[in-house]
Amino acid sequence: MVRFGRKEVYLPNAVIALIKSEHLPATHAKFRVPLTFSKLDLRDYLFHAYGLRTDKIRSYVQQQRVQHDRPDATVPQQNKWFRPKAIKHMTVEMDKPFVWPEDPESWEPWSKEIYSQLQDDADGRDKPATKIKEAREEAQTLAKQARELLQGKKRWRPTPVDEVVEEVDRDVKI
């Protein structure tokens, strides 16, 4: 007999995601867990958090494909390889079946459109091509300002140190 509840979990500092899998039977559930999680950790977490007893747990680590350079690199480099962090999945066999609830007819209370738009914006900002474009635009602006200074169209005016000190003093509250 399996003894549940050996490791008490009060406030877990791990993110565990239940993944909807159409091909699994109702008595199975698939989770995405941290790489440091063991089968016993997941079993005790489910027991203490949800009162769920599990029979068998299968786990596998999914390696990610090797990519050219890091996705967060500002300037892409040739012949630099990067492998993203692996993902660990665990499939749990439960004694009672679990049925996913139906999707709501209206997603308005959850602001799904706004969330999707924010996700799309964030995905675009993280791409190296976007960062390169932003860096080029900034470089062009600086080059234009430098040309105007050299041609005498604009006059250089250094910022007085007193203004900077006053600005910093206003921000700091003791």
Image (cartoon, rainbow, N blue to C red):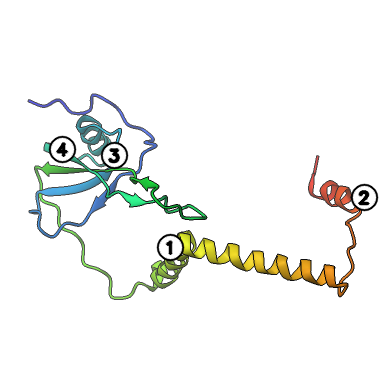
Mark 1 against mark 4, which lies toward the viewer?
1
Q: Which residue is mark 3?
A: 49
First in residue order: circle 4 vs circle 2:
4
Report how far apart the C-alphas of labels 1 and 4 lie in the structure.
38 Å
| Lateral position of residue 9 relative to residue 127, left or right | left
> Which image quadrant for residue 153?
bottom right
Q: Nearer the viewer, residue 82 or 113?
A: 82
In this view, 142 is above or below 57: below
Q: Position of residue 165 (x, y in %)?
A: 87, 47
| Element type where label 2 sits in the image | helix
Which numbered disc flags the more N-terminal residue, 1 or 4? 4
Q: How many marks?
A: 4
Residue beneath label 2, please?
Answer: 162
The answer to whether residue 103 is left or right of residue 111 is left
What residue did someone put label 4 on?
53
Residue 116 is left or right of residue 42, and the answer is right
User: Which of the numbered marks, if any, corresponds to residue 123?
Assistant: 1
